[in-house]
Image (tube, rainbow, N blue to C red):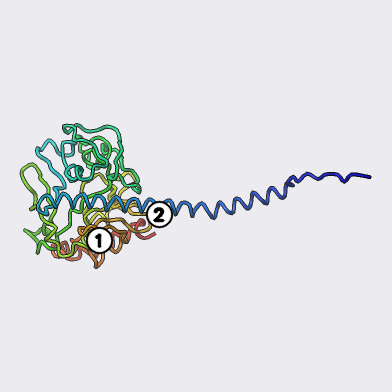
């Protein structure tokens, strides 16, 4: 009796090409989905950092008669733009205890470090070098923010409380509740969160690209490069977006959420400053809206 010959189940060339084509199609479909999931995870982690930092500032205020931390302290004129300056991150770090480095007698750090929750997972360049500071200040050096002790990114809203500050003061915009110490004394008065008419709609912390410790509403219409260097003609805002035309912020009532960048310069005014700027300089709000709308990061 003749045995039937066995048949090996090998792929033909055409079958192999079909399988490869199917894998390529599936990869093309799934890779963007994976990228979107990764971006969403980073946004969520960044939002959590905002909330935790906001709680740290709140605990500081609870121990200091509801007064906000000074966003910057410059004791001597020679301290400007050196690591001898101190900022709100230094003052609130004991409440957070996750990231950042010791004062180190004001000696600048020269290499990046673990930023902990002070380091945003969505920041483009949290430890970018501040040496090429845009006005060429020769003493500025090191990675991260102004102090080199912390990564750049999360910034205290310097404009908070300006709307409650009344009309223009000597032709200038009304002061807010966040003050700083600059050599000769206190600039503005250290304010309290109790002065805010709507703490639940007032930004406490926003995420910026540049090296400054504070952020302000005008930065929505300023452009920076990917390394956080301010300058015209760039495609990115100096306020870091969450890549979906939005931005994560923490509010003075303790909550944090993602809001649309364009809406933050609109009628809701979560920066708590546009009404004050408009009183000091009529037309300011519309000019800022136009500048913000011209930045691709907020529109595409």
Q: CA distance from mark 1 to mark 2?
A: 28 Å
Which residue carries the number 2 mark?
Answer: 40
Residue 199 versus residue 14 in the image, above or below? below
Seen at 10% across and 44% down, the residue is 182
Residue 8 versus residue 205 in the image, above or below? above
Residue 62: give its label.
none
Residue 104 in percent (x, y) is at: 19, 32
Q: Name the side, left or right, on which 30 lies relative to 60.
A: right
Seen at 12% across and 47% down, the residue is 180
Could you say which quadrant of the image residue 270 lies in?
bottom left
Circle 2 Cα neighbour tier, 10 Å, few/some/many (<14 / 14–19 / ≥20): some
Seen at 71% across and 50% down, the residue is 15
Q: Nearer the viewer, residue 216 or 222?
A: 216
Quick one: which residue is furthest to the front in this view?
A: 1
Q: Nearer the viewer, residue 76 or 189?
A: 189
Per the image, label 2 sits on a secondary structure element best described as helix
Residue 112 in percent (x, y) is at: 30, 36
Q: Nearer the viewer, residue 279 or 160?
A: 160
Of marks 1 and 2, which one's residue comes earlier in the chain? Answer: 2
Quick one: which residue is furthest to the right in this view?
A: 1
Circle 1 Cα neighbour tier, 10 Å, few/some/many (<14 / 14–19 / ≥20): many
Residue 130 in percent (x, y) is at: 26, 39
Residue 293 in percent (x, y) is at: 32, 61
Could you say which quadrant of the image residue 151 lies in?
top left
Label 1 or label 2, whichever lies nearer to me, is 2
Quick one: which residue is furthest to the bottom in this view?
A: 267
Which residue carries the number 1 mark?
Answer: 288
Does the residue at mark 1 contact the one at mark 2 (Cβ under 8 Å)? no
Q: Quadrant of the C terminus?
A: bottom left
Per the image, label 1 sits on a secondary structure element best described as helix
């Amino acid at each position: 009796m003749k045995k039937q010959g066995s048949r090996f189940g090998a792929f033909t060339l055409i079958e192999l090409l079909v399988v490869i084509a199917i894998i390529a199609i599936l990869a093309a479909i799934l890779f963007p989905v994976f990228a979107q999931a990764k971006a969403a995870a980073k946004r969520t982690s960044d939002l959590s950092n905002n909330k935790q930092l906001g709680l740290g500032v709140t605990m500081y205020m609870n121990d200091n008669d509801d007064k906000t931390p000074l966003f910057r302290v410059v004791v001597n004129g020679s301290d400007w733009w050196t690591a001898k300056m101190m900022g709100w991150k230094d003052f609130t770090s004991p409440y957070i205890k996750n990231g950042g480095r010791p004062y180190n007698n004001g000696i600048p750090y020269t290499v990046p470090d673990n930023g902990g929750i002070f380091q945003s997972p969505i920041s483009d360049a949290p430890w970018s070098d501040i040496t090429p500071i845009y006005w060429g200040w020769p003493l500025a050096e090191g990675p991260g923010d102004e102090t080199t002790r912390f990564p750049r990114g999360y910034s205290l809203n310097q404009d908070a409380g300006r709307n409650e500050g009344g009309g223009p003061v000597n032709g200038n915009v009304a002061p807010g509740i966040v003050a700083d110490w600059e050599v000769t004394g206190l600039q503005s008065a250290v304010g309290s969160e109790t002065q805010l008419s709507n703490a639940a709609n007032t930004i406490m912390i926003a995420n910026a690209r540049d090296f400054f410790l504070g952020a302000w509403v005008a930065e929505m219409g300023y452009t920076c490069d990917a390394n956080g260097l301010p300058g015209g003609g760039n495609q990115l805002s100096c306020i870091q977006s969450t890549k979906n035309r939005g931005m994560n912020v923490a509010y003075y009532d303790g909550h944090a959420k993602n809001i649309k960048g364009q809406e933050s310069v609109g009628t809701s005014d979560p920066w708590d400053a546009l009404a004050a700027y408009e009183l000091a300089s009529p037309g300011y709000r519309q000019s800022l809206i136009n500048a913000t709308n011209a930045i691709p990061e907020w529109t595409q």
